[in-house]
Image (cartoon, rainbow, N blue to C red):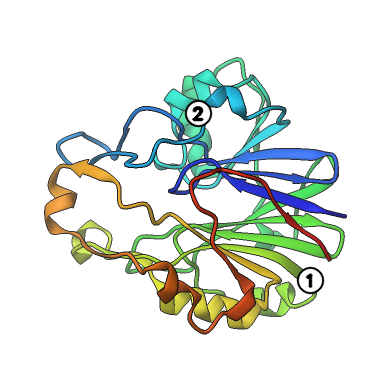
Amino acid sequence: MMLQIRRLNMDTSWQLQWGQTILLIDPWLQGSEIDGFAWFNEQWHTVPPISIDLLGVYHAIVISQPFSDHCHEETLHQLNSVPLLVNPKAKKRLVKEFEKREIETLPLWDKKEWLRFGNVDIAYLKSSKVLSAAFDAILIRNEHELIVYCPHGFELTLEQQTYLSRYQVKALIVGFSSFELPFFLGGVVNPGKTNALELAKVLNPQTIFHTHDENKASKGIVKRIAKIKYPTVEEMKEELEAQFVFLGQAYEWYSIVS
């Protein structure tokens, strides 16, 4: 079954069609995003996202994290009133904001549960990090095939590695940039290219897409104290050969065939 995917911005918003099911993932398509307070961190896209009126049909919206660059209420208010399939950490803020929307909580994969939507199953992987900022991953399954979405990278446990080895990973969507704050503000937010390569080695995906690496305009404390590195396209391609696919800002569909 063909999988089609496209970027919706140059950060970490995506649209995919797998069979008859079309999903949006973490749409932030207008305005700024604020982490807590604007004086702490406010960011804007430097490359304009796709226009909302060009999205076409979509059946649900997946939210992977509770933070505003993934869970962007301003954008969600402008999108169609389709079901929200959300990480449980994001549900609390969304229930308050969207009282009349259908909101489904994604199950934790470690309990071997999946949420069925259309012809796909969706779950989340909980980060095992303790001393650094913890960001979860999303799994989207279609029979024996899998999409793994890790916008902040991910450290797989042995149990998770063993289980995921049963599947053919059609696409790994992973961050290559590194982003580090002082430990008292979360420490390592994005582990960078080394982690992306580790995931690629373990999962052996058919295709690898980079994500969450737009060099955004920003203001606030975070901008002054964060240590950030954005690899070039050439640096991201190193060691990945034909697996790595660079999607530029044309926001066109890319087809993945078996």
Taking depth in this image into account, of 139 and 58 the one nearest to the observer is: 58
Dot in front, 2 or 1: 1
Distance Cα–Cα, label 2 vs label 1: 32 Å
Q: Is residue 109 at least partly visible in the picture?
A: yes
In the image, residue 31 lies at what x, y percent? 35, 27
The residue at the far top in this view is 100
Residue marked by disc 2? 94
Left or right, residue 26 beside residue 180: right
The residue at the far front in this view is 250
The quadrant holding residue 244 is bottom right
Residue type at numbered disc 1: Tyr
Q: Is residue 157 at least partly visible in the picture?
A: no
Residue type at numbered disc 2: Leu
In the image, residue 175 lies at what x, y percent? 46, 63
In the image, residue 235 lies at what x, y percent? 41, 76
Q: Are marks 2 and 1 in contact (CB under 8 Å)?
A: no
Residue in the picture at 54% in, 61% down: 246
Residue marked by disc 1? 167
In the image, residue 88 lies at what x, y percent? 55, 43
